[in-house]
């Protein structure tokens, strides 16, 4: 799923009910849990449905001066101090993050590398109560490793090689017998998750972001209420304009 810079996807985001806080993304400083500054927020990346997915962080003089991506669920916002805290983040982790710039396409490989670095932090969020209905509700899928469809156990017979085990996108049809197909059952379960923020908004298809709630799920516990509310307003406004 393509990702877009906030300003490109929502050209008027600063004027859209930002409450004087979320319209100043570039004013937020990024800190580790120990009050160590590791950079400043530079931008937000959204997916095709308009949901926030990453905070772009400029590490400036703190860590090699590169821009890196922070999954939005790991960003604990302090709106009054215009700070973002990432509990458990270390300088070494930031150093190992792949470099991001506006000219590159954030593909699956890049995102896999990002999630790999943040995995210990994401696993610590597995018991959160996430906001909104666009996230999966199955407790098993709150675990960052269990929730990735690409890593799910194979369904049915995968053949002799087993080369594509666990990837629902590449699995062939199951043959023989009249028993219900696990693949169809899985697809039906995923279709029921295509819920919207509100009934009058466009449907949001399940994606890797919905499965990986440890990285991308917003929660009150992490002070994401205002962020979630702003996201909803932006999506509603864009939908009305379309």
Image (cartoon, rainbow, N blue to C red):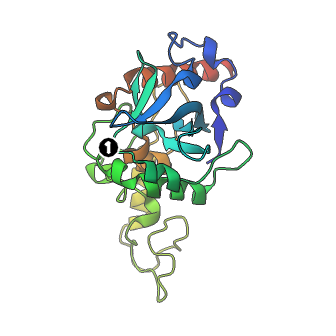
Q: Quadrant of residue 178?
A: bottom left
The foreground one among 231 and 26 is 26
Quadrant in the picture for the C terminus: top right
Viewer can see residue 187: no
Residue 22 in picture, x, y percent from top left: 52, 19
Q: Secondary structure at mark 1?
A: loop
Viewer can see residue 121: yes
Residue 76 in picture, x, y percent from top left: 38, 31
Residue 66 in picture, x, y percent from top left: 62, 45
Placement of 81 over or under 195, stated as above or below: above
The foreground one among 180 and 160 is 160
The residue positioned 62% from the left and 51% from the top of the image is 99
Figure label count: 1
The residue positioned 34% from the left and 40% from the top of the image is 87
The residue positioned 33% from the left and 31% from the top of the image is 222
Other residues around mark 1 within 10 Å, as few (<14) / some (14–19) / many (≥20): some
Residue at which label 1 appears: 137
- Horizontally, residue 103 falls left or right of residue 113, namely right
The residue positioned 45% from the left and 58% from the top of the image is 116
Q: Quadrant of residue 202?
A: top right
Residue 110 in picture, x, y percent from top left: 59, 56
- Horizontally, residue 110 falls left or right of residue 87, namely right
């Amino acid at each position: 799923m393509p990702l877009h810079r906030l300003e490109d996807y929502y050209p008027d985001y600063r004027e859209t009910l930002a409450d004087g806080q979320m319209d100043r993304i570039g004013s937020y400083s990024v800190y580790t849990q120990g009050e160590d500054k590791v950079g400043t927020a530079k931008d937000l990346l959204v997916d095709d449905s308009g949901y926030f997915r990453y905070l772009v962080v400029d590490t400036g003089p703190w860590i090699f001066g590169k821009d890196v991506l922070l999954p939005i669920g790991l960003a604990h916002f302090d709106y009054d101090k215009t700070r973002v805290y990432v509990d458990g983040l270390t300088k070494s982790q930031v150093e190992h993050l792949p470099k991001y710039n506006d000219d590159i396409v954030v593909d699956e490989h890049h995102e896999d590398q990002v999630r790999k670095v943040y995995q210990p932090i994401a696993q610590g969020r597995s018991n959160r109560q996430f906001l909104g209905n666009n996230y999966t509700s199955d407790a098993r899928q709150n675990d960052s490793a269990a929730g990735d469809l690409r890593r799910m156990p194979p369904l049915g017979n995968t053949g002799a090689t087993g080369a594509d085990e666990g990837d629902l996108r590449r699995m062939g049809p199951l043959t023989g017998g009249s028993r219900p197909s696990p693949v169809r059952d899985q697809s039906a379960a995923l279709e029921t998750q295509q819920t919207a923020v509100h009934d009058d908004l466009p449907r949001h298809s399940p994606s890797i972001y919905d499965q990986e709630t440890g990285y991308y799920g917003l929660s009150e516990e992490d002070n994401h209420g205002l962020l979630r509310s702003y996201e909803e307003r932006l999506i509603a406004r864009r939908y009305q304009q379309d």
